[in-house]
Image (spheres, rainbow, N blue to C red):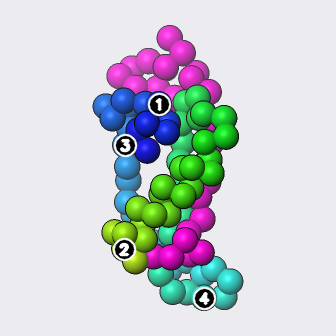
Amino acid sequence: MRQTLGKPEDFMMVSLEETRPLIMGGDSGPAAFLDLRSIGLPEGAQEELSRKLCDLLAISTNLPPDRVYINFQDVKREDWAWNSKTFAG
């Protein structure tokens, strides 16, 4: 992921949360919703990221790709802050 996003690992974070079951297509079996946000999401990287994330979930959890939804968001530098300042500053 790091290479595809072009970000150093120091600026990446992952949060895993177990919530109520997701119902996809009327099926409440195992599923995942991923929310990937990045400042400067590389244009056209979504397909590669989708494949890599689904492969990772399939290997680590046996979750098939058709049970995974991914939301990609390109966040403006001024809308993300760390260490008391935005990334625009």
Is residue 85 part of the magenta span, yes or no?
A: yes
Q: Where is residue 79 in the image (x, y as percent from the top left)?
A: 58, 28
Residue appearing at x 54%, y 64% in the figure:
33
Q: Name the residue under label 1.
A: 6
Q: Estimate the spatial distance between the alpha carbons at disc 3 and disc 2, rounded to whole Å.
A: 19 Å
Closer to the camera: disc 3 or disc 2?
2
Q: Where is residue 17 in the image (x, y as percent from the top left)?
A: 39, 63
CA–CA distance in space, label 1 to label 3: 14 Å
Residue behind mark 2: 61
At 56% across and 55% down in the image, what residue appears?
Answer: 50
Seen from this angle, which residue lies furthest left? Answer: 10
The stretch of residues the image draws in magenta is 63-89
Q: In the image, what residue type sits under mark 3?
A: Met
Residue at screen point 41% across, 62% down: 56
- Mark before the other along the chain sequence, 4 or 2: 4
Which residue is drawn at the image coordinates 49% and 36% (left, top)?
5
Q: Residue 22 carries which label?
A: none
Q: Is mark 2 on a helix, strand or loop?
A: helix
Q: Mark 3 points at which residue?
A: 13
